[in-house]
Image (cartoon, rainbow, N blue to C red):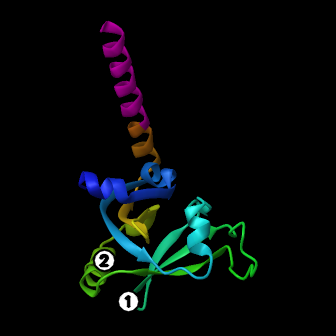
Amino acid sequence: MSRADRALRKTVCVHRRARFDYEIVSTLEAGLVLQGAEVKALREGKGNLVDAWVQLRDGVPVLHNLEISPYSHDTARGSEGRRSRTLLLHADEIRKLDQRLREKGLTLVPLEIYFHGPWAKAEIGVCRGRRKADKRQLLMRREAQRDIDREAHRRR
C-alpha cells in the first residue's frame, strides 16, 4: 500500500480476535452497500465486527452481523443495527473466492471496516481456523519475541 493510499484510509473498526483465532491465507478489499445514515454512523466510529461473518450466497458475498449503531443526529431511526449487507466485488474475484472456499477448512472472515476516500470498504480474509495448541504456540512466540525486544532495548 502506497503512502498516498494510507493517507486516504481511515479505519472504523478492526476484528482483532480474528487474527488470533484464524490463520489468514489471503485478504481482499470489498465495497460495502449501506443504507440511510449508516455511512455517517460509521464515520462516527459506530461499527462493531465482533460477531460478524461473511458468506457467499448465490454467488453474492454477504456480510452478516456487522453492528452499526444508530447515527446520533438521525431523525428517521429506520436502520437496523445488525442486518446482512452486500459486499461489492468483481465477478472474477467472486469466482476465485468460490473456488478457494471449496478447499477444506477455509472460511471468510471480515477483518476491518474502513473508509478509502469517500467509500466504505471491508477487508475480508480467506482464513483457516487455528487449533488450541496452535494458539498456545502463537502466544509463546509473541511472549518470547517481546522478551527479546525488551532485553535488546534494555542493553542500548
Q: Amino acid at mark 1?
A: Gly
**Residue located at (44% from left, 57% from top):** 10
Q: Amino acid at mark 2?
A: Leu
Mark 2: secondary structure: helix
Q: Is residue 65 visible?
A: no
Residue 145, x across and y down, in percent: 34, 27
Q: Nearer the viewer, residue 63 or 69?
A: 69
Is 91 above or below relative to 67?
below
Q: Nearer the viewer, residue 129 or 73?
A: 73
Mark 1: secondary structure: loop
Figure quadrant of the C terminus: top left
Is 26 above or below relative to 151?
below
**Residue located at (36% from left, 68% from top):** 106
**Residue located at (51% from left, 51% from top):** 17
Q: Is residue 26 visible?
A: yes
Q: Which residue is mark 1?
A: 59
The kind of secondary structure the magenta stretch mainly shows is: helix
Answer with mark 1 or mark 2, whichever residue precedes in sequence. Answer: 1
Q: Which residue is mark 2?
A: 97
* Relative side of 145 to 110, left or right: left
Is 154 above or below relative to 11?
above
Q: Quadrant of residue 44?
A: bottom right
Instruction: Report how many numbered discs are placed on residues in the image.
Output: 2
Residue 92, x across and y down, in percent: 24, 84
Q: Which residues are magenta?
A: 139-156
Residue 98, x across and y down, in percent: 31, 81
How busy is the neighbourhood of tag 1: few (under 14 within 10 Å), some, or many (20 plus)? Answer: few
Residue 144 in the magenta stretch? The answer is yes
How busy is the neighbourhood of tag 2: few (under 14 within 10 Å), some, or many (20 plus)? Answer: some
Give the Cα separation between the discs numbered 1 and 2: 10 Å
